[in-house]
C-alpha cells in the first residue's frame, strides 16, 4: 500500500466492517504512531501480552483464521494505545468477528 493510499485510511476502527478493513486501519494506526511490526511485538511483550511477529503481521494483513480478541488487545498494547481507546477497537472486532465472542455469563 502506498503512502498516498495509506493517508486515506483512518487510524480508527469506526466503520471497519471486514477483516481486511480492520487490518488496513491497524496498519494506519501503526503508521500514525510510527511503529514497526517489530516494535509492536517488543512493546506487547513488555506490556505482559506477548504476540509473535507472524501473528502481528497476520493481523494487519487479515490473513489466516479469525484472530483471537486477546491478539488484537496485545497488538493495541504494542502500539501503546490507551485502554480507553482500545475499547473502540474491541467493539469493532466484536462486530467483524461475532462468532468469536464468548457467551454472556449467567
Image (cartoon, rainbow, N blue to C red):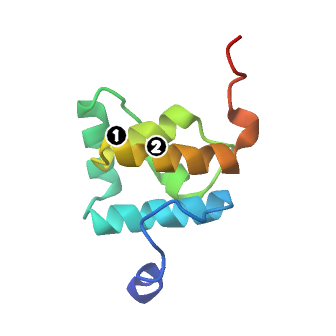
Q: What residue did someone put label 2 on?
A: 87
Let me know if residue 51 appears in the view.
Answer: yes
Q: Position of residue 83 (x, y in %)?
A: 34, 40
Question: What's the distance in space between the residues labelled 2 and 1, CA to CA?
Answer: 7 Å
Q: Quadrant of residue 100?
A: top right
Task: Name which residue lies at 49% across and 37% down.
Answer: 71
Q: Which residue lies furthest to the right in this view?
A: 99
The structure residue drawn at horizontal position 36% and vertical position 43%, both measured from the top left corner, is 84
Label 2 close to label 1 by CB (< 8 Å): yes
Question: In x, y percent, where is residue 91?
Answer: 57, 45
Observer able to see residue 54: no
Q: Helix, strand or loop at disc 2?
A: helix
Q: Measuring from the top left, give residue 66's x and y in whole percent.
A: 67, 43
* The quadrant where residue 65 appears: top right
Q: Nearer the viewer, residue 7 or 105?
A: 105
Instruction: Say which residue label 1 marks.
Output: 83
Mark 1 burial class by Cα count in 10 Å: few <14, some 14-19, many 20+: few
Amino acid at each position: 500500500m502506498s503512502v498516498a493510499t495509506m493517508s486515506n485510511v483512518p487510524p480508527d476502527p469506526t466503520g471497519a466492517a471486514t477483516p481486511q478493513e480492520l487490518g488496513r486501519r491497524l496498519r494506519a494506526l501503526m503508521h500514525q504512531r510510527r511503529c514497526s511490526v517489530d516494535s509492536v511485538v517488543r512493546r506487547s511483550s513488555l506490556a505482559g501480552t506477548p504476540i509473535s511477529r507472524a501473528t502481528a503481521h497476520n493481523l494487519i494483513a487479515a490473513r489466516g483464521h479469525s484472530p483471537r480478541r486477546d491478539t488484537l488487545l496485545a497488538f493495541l498494547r504494542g502500539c501503546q494505545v490507551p485502554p480507553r481507546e482500545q475499547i473502540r477497537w474491541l467493539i469493532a472486532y466484536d462486530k467483524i468477528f461475532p462468532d468469536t465472542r464468548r457467551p454472556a455469563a449467567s
